Image (cartoon, grey):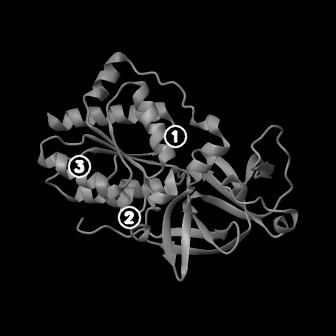
Amino acid sequence: MTEASAVPQKLLLFRLAGNRLSALGTLKIREIMPIQRLTQIPHSHPAVMGTMNFRGSAVPVIDMAAAVGYPALDAEARKTASIIVTDIQRQEIGFLVRSVDRIVEANWKQVQAPPRALGDQAFITGLLQIDNDLVQLMDVELLLARVYPESMRANPTQLTDLERETLREQRILVVDDSQVARRQLADALDRENIPYEVTGNGQTALDRITEGNRDQNPVTILVSDIEMPGMDGYELTFHLRDDRSMHQPYIILHTSLNSEMSVSYAQQVGANEALTKFDAEELLHAMLRGASHSAVVSE
């Protein structure tokens, strides 16, 4: 490999309030449909409008504007609103939006991280200039964590003492731009008292891995998100695999996308595994496979 193959990253643009455009990656999207008849859910979050029937399953519908702090759509606005049915973190969720604009192709290198002044409560993972519009990429992981806080409670893991010690001997680097995902990963490793390092973007991860290789303290297991501003997980993986002088970490691409396409491309760029967020035990056992792989390679 001499250069990374560009993968079209398509975004669905939509509006929540006013004229500001927001976006979701199309790999997260199952279908776009007009407002449906909804069944109310008692004692649910105020932004949860109810459930709808989608291909034989009951799918919750969230008013995205209300969930992120805008006024909820009124009855008149709902008449022309759309529901974006998504497949995120192993579950189908519908998001009600004021209007759908269009689908565009985007390069993740052009996505800028949100300004720090916005703090860690902003529901955006990045900003992108499209034509004359500044588009906000929605942080649906943070949104879902706010609407369904119980989803942040990971199931207890079952590692043996030997497995725990095996992972403690590894140098593990976690890369994710989502604060929610970083917290979930950190909680899973902290519960087992497994040391790790964490960063929020691909370029910083590449720099840290390069530095560790130079100092003969290589990263042995890399867990990286795919969709990140600047250098995404695919490009990070490609750069590492393309540098034959580099000690090669075991690479696990960890994503909210439930997509055969994302898994296929992860394999093409050289990732060892691609997992859908978030199953702590599944992730820890993938790391154990990485530890075994590292042991074989070093022999």
- How far apart are the alpha carbons under marks 1 and 3? 24 Å
Q: Does 162 sit above or below residue 224? A: above
Check residue 209 in the rendering and tell me which mark sits there, or answer none. Answer: 3
In the image, taking residue 142 as reference, residue 59 lies left or right, namely right
CA gap, disc 1 and disc 2:
23 Å
**Which element carries disc 2, helix, strand or loop?**
loop
Res 147 → quadrant: top right
According to the image, label 1 marks what residue? Answer: 278
Is residue 34 at least partly visible in the picture? Answer: yes
Q: Please tell me which of labels 3 and 2 falls first in the chain.
A: 3
Q: Secondary structure at mark 3?
A: helix
Q: Is residue 254 left or right of residue 245?
A: right
Q: How many marks?
A: 3
Residue 245 placed where, x, y %? 13, 53
Q: CA distance from mark 3 to mark 2?
A: 17 Å
| Residue at 38 percent of width and 18 percent of height | 160
Quadrant in the picture for the C terminus: top left
What amino acid does circle 1 point to?
Answer: Phe
Among the 4 quarters of the image, the one containing residue 107:
bottom left
On-image quarter of the N terminus: bottom left
Q: Amino acid at mark 2?
A: Gly
With respect to residue 258, does 137 lie above or below?
A: below
Residue named by callout 2:
230
